[in-house]
Amino acid sequence: MKGKNLARKGILKIKSYVPGKSIEEVQKELGTKKWIKLASNENLLGPSAKAIVAIRKELPNIYLYPEGPCPVLRKALAEKFRISERMVVISNGADNLLLMIANAFVNEGDEVVMADPTFSVYTNVTQIMGGKPINVKLKNFTHDLDSMLKKVNSRTKLVFICNPNNPTGTIVSRKEFNEFLSKLPKRVIVVLDEAYGDFADDASGATGLDYVKKGKQLI
């Protein structure tokens, strides 16, 4: 029996991700030493000097298991953003967090509404859990919230909104988001992904923290 016949059906639906070539590969192929890689959305400014100091300080302790729930970090973030520690979840990057959300809320046959195109991992985590991605085409390169609302039905469990959107860089304003949220059934959870929020130069974009503090159905 082939191994794939034993895999979960949701896993078999996922399309393979093909990453861009590394700088080292391109240098070897083309013989050019100076390259700037834009495909991975990496911060070319590098890490904070304070972060480097903190990492060096902890190097002697890397043989120890880390604290899984990250209580110290959760406490610091809760104090910084003035929210309860119970509202803070630490993950190993965005992909891991999105999978955690799907694990927690998406059952077999549930529908998950998202834009098209947007961050591909939304589709992946939905399919892994046996859910059905409902794709809504962008309008003028941004989320068409009215059309997304029309796709919400009794089977809808989550709505993913990437703000700013990956890959278009467009934003959903607070005004647009307020109207959308007011019309959305309370049983549907919105996942507002602000992974690139710090790079947005438009201050009118919706910010999830404001809604979380008000007890809205939002992650």
Image (cartoon, rainbow, N blue to C red):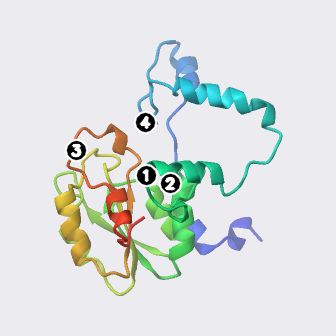
As shown in the figure, which amino acid type bears the numbered disc 1?
Phe
Distance between the alpha carbons at the discs numbered 4 and 2: 27 Å
Dot 1 falls on a residue whose secondary structure is helix
For label 1, the crowd category at 10 Å Cα-Cα, with few meaning under 14, some 14 to 19 and many 20 or more, is few
Residue at left 70%, top 56%?
A: 68
For label 2, the crowd category at 10 Å Cα-Cα, with few meaning under 14, some 14 to 19 and many 20 or more, is some
Which of marks 1 and 3 precedes in the sequence? 1
Residue at left 50%, top 17%?
A: 30
Are dots 1 and 2 in contact, CB under 8 Å?
A: yes
Residue placed most toward the observer, 165 or 67: 67
Residue placed most toward the observer, 199 or 31: 199
Q: Which residue is mark 1?
A: 81
Of tags 4 and 2, which is closer to the observer? 2
Dot 2 falls on a residue whose secondary structure is helix
Of tags 3 and 2, which is closer to the observer? 2
Residue 193 seen in this snapshot: yes
The picture quadrant where one finds residue 135 is: bottom left
